[in-house]
Image (tube, grey):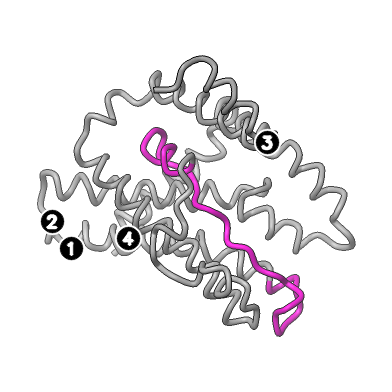
Amino acid sequence: MMNGGSITAWWNRLGRNDRIMVGVVALLAVYWLISSGGRMLNPAWLLAATAIVFVALPIHEFAHAAVAVALGDDTPRRQGRYTLNPLAHIAPFGAVLIYLVGFGWAKPVQWNPRNIDMDPKPGSILVAIAGPLSNLLLAALGAALFRSGLVESGLAAQFLYAFVQINVLLFVFNMIPVPPLDGSHVLFALLPGDTYRLRAQLSQYGMLILLAVVFFADGLITVPTQAILRFLFTVG
């Protein structure tokens, strides 16, 4: 157990972004305690969150890596990210948030747009959307299995529903056009001209903007999430 001195030393070793990340996790933990309604005591939720951390998030990051490699950039392969091994992708804070609030992140895949065999702007869009689309595909597969009747009720059905729900939430959350989320790369690729200054400004305040969305404008996340869930569970 850390004492006061070791906690202070640990805090002093953290960089600015790491301190912001700790603050984000702490605030979202408080948010979870207020709104979760005992979700962490639900075995189905815990199983679904574990499947997200060890399956869905690695697939998400591998999708980014696979598209970048397919377009000609070998950076993800050289950095060991062209793999489905969860240990190559898990980010502790992001994994904790999956359990607490249902959305989080893995370690971002690095790649170099200058190495790809096409225009960097559409290439950036393809690489960026590959991750969120993998979550949407996993959600669609889970919902199809749920609708098939093979899973009647009980723990398995609750697990499937939670797994679909978290994947849809990850899709919507990641498409918010604010750094460091995937939607920001799509935004910058679509904007004309040099976006360096805008990118720098949004990157500086990105986490604060996301916190504002979560606490004060959560409809930007919940409304599209619920719409997609209704579609997935009723289509066909």
Query: In the image, which disc is placed on residue 148?
Result: 1
Q: Tell me the mark number nearer the camera, choosing from 2 and 3.
A: 3
| Marks 3 and 1 close (CB-CB < 8 Å) | no
Q: Which residues are magenta?
A: 94-123
Residue at image mark 3: 15
> Between residues 136 and 64, which one lies in front from this camera angle?
64
Q: Residues within 10 Å of mark 3 (few under 14, many from 20)?
A: few
The residue singled out by tag 2 in the image is 151
Specify the amino acid type for callout 1: Ser
- Horizontal side, residue 40 vs residue 149: left or right: right
- Secondary structure at badge 3 equals loop
Secondary structure category for the residue under label 4: loop
| Amino acid type at image mark 2 | Val
Contact check, label 2 and label 1, Cβ < 8 Å: yes
Q: Earlier in the sequence, mark 2 or mark 3?
A: 3
Categorize mark 1 by other alpha carbons within 10 Å: few (<14), some (14-19), many (20+): few
Mark sitting earlier along the chain (2/4): 2
Mark nearer the viewer, 2 or 4 = 2
Q: Amino acid at mark 4?
A: Val
Q: The residue under label 3 is which amino acid type?
A: Gly
Look at the image and tell me in which quarter the N terminus lies: top left
**Which tag is nearer the camera, tag 3 or tag 1?**
3
The mark that comes first in sequence, 4 or 3, is: 3
Q: CA distance from mark 4 to mark 1?
A: 11 Å
Decide: is 214 above or below 133: above
Q: Quadrant of residue 18?
A: top right
Left-right relation of 221 to 20: left
